[in-house]
């Protein structure tokens, strides 16, 4: 198998329309980087994927993740930078010669062929011996649990079964790198959960490197050894799922990773009171934890205006705290999601329902919420960067 290395990769789509006058620049979408060469879809992308590692590219639609995957596959030309699969530079190598396989969102199965024929097709094109083709197809079918469907055609299969066939067609080739472009997005919620579990089992049974693209952060958090969060063609953060969740690099990552998303109090202030760092928010003063204090003292952080972030599951209901009015309460079985307004901030809290009277937490009620300072995240208001990163 092989590692994958992307060095300073860029993708620029040339302008096809006549260049507009400079006065029209203010009307262009802010998230598009437009240069004299064209629209920059991927900018200065650097990533090293180890042999057999499972890396997930995640981000909102239009962030450049699928474009990056297609450049690795050879389906998009690389505008600048170097792409290595193993020790081989493959910028100008045809897709068929890169020793990669790709699973598409739309399955891309041949409707007139059986499952067996779909899975065997690429091996037949390589003129492999019939006994080898049969062995590889049946081994892949056994791994994916589709042995009973080998004689069926795609129209007789469910969406999850079709996706397994598409994955099987890819793995029979024993590729060095397996690329997946939002393979579960066409499935319903229950089937997505099942297929995520199947993919986790699959990666332990085949010796290949995975590069997976999704906009679904649940997939990213459960599947990836590391995740790469992208926005507007730029990498925002690379790390393990827990690193990105616990230590988001900036406001975008903090808001994108986590369901429900992190709460942000945008009018908070970082103060130094009697030599201790505190945060003033909505009329309350919260003294930060000793670990936070030490880090801020070490970096000699001055007082400044900040955005205070805290995840919904880290808020507590108390007798005395920040007053918040409940607008909507959602009962989710063992927990309740409270959507509230606190001052000029919209706040969501996730609280367990065990042992409490949840009927009193209806819309219009006023409660008090408290922040655990050790679980708070501090962001510079101007740049959005995490102060303690």
Image (spheres, rainbow, N blue to C red):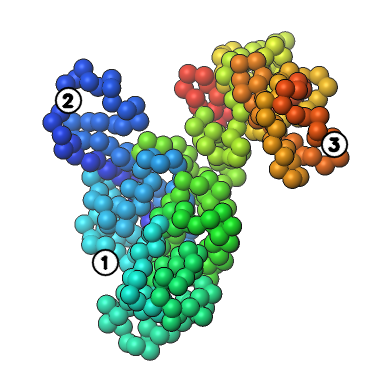
Q: What separation in Å lies between label 3 and label 2 (alpha carbons)?
A: 62 Å
The image's mark for residue 20 is 2
Q: Specify few, some or many for label 3: CA neighbours under 10 Å numbering under 14, 14-19, or 20 or more.
A: few
- Residue 179 in view here: no
1 or 3: tag closer to the N-terminus: 1
Q: Identify which residue is drawn at 41% across, 67% down.
A: 166
Q: Few, some or many C-alpha atoms within 10 Å of disc 1 (few <14, some 14-19, many ≥20)? A: few
CB atoms of marks 3 and 2 within 8 Å: no
Report the front residue among 74 and 368. Answer: 368
Residue 249 located left or right of residue 61 = right
- The residue tagged 1 is 96
Q: Which mark is residue 356?
A: 3
Residue lying at 67% horizontally and 19% vertically, measured from the top left: 342
Task: Please name which of the two marks, 1 or 2, marks the residue nearer to the observer.
Answer: 2
| Tally of numbered discs | 3
**Which quarter of the image is occupied by the C terminus?**
top right
Along the polypeptide, which appears first: circle 1 or circle 2?
A: 2
């Amino acid at each position: 198998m092989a590692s994958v290395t992307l060095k300073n990769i860029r993708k620029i789509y040339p302008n096809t329309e006549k260049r507009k006058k400079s006065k029209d620049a203010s009307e262009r979408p802010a998230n598009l980087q437009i240069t004299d060469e064209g629209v920059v879809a991927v900018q200065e992308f650097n990533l090293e994927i180890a042999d057999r590692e499972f890396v997930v590219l995640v981000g909102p639609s239009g962030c450049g993740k699928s474009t990056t995957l297609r450049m690795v596959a050879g389906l998009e030309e690389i505008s600048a930078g170097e792409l290595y699969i193993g020790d081989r530079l493959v910028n100008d190598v045809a897709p068929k010669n890169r020793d990669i396989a790709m699973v598409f969102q739309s399955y891309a199965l041949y409707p007139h062929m059986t499952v067996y024929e779909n899975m065997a097709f690429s091996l037949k094109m390589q003129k492999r011996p019939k006994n080898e083709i049969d062995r590889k197809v049946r081994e892949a079918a056994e791994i994916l649990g589709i042995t009973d469907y080998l004689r069926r055609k795609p129209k007789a299969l469910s969406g999850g079964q079709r996706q397994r066939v598409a994955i099987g067609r890819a793995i029979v080739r024993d590729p060095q790198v397996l690329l997946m472009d939002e393979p579960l997005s066409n499935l319903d919620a229950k089937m997505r959960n099942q297929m995520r579990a199947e993919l986790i089992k699959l990666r332990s049974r085949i010796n290949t490197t995975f590069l997976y693209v999704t906009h679904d952060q649940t997939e990213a958090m459960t599947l990836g050894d590391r995740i790469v969060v992208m926005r507007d063609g730029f990498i925002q953060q690379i790390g393990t799922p827990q690193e990105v969740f616990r230590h988001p690099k900036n406001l975008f990552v903090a808001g994108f990773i986590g369901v429900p998303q992190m709460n942000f109090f945008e009018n908070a202030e970082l103060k130094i009171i009697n030599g201790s760092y505190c945060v003033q928010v909505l009329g309350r003063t919260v003294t930060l934890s000793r670990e936070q204090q030490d880090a801020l003292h070490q970096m000699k952080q001055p007082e400044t205006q900040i955005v205070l972030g805290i995840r919904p599951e880290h808020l507590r209901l108390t007798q005395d705290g920040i007053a918040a009015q409940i607008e909507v309460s959602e009962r989710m079985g063992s927990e309740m999601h409270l959507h509230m307004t606190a001052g000029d901030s919209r706040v969501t809290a996730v609280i367990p329902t065990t042992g409490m009277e949840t009927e009193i937490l209806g819309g219009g009620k006023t409660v008090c919420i408290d922040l655990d300072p050790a679980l708070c995240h501090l962001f510079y208001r101007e740049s959005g960067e995490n102060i303690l990163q």
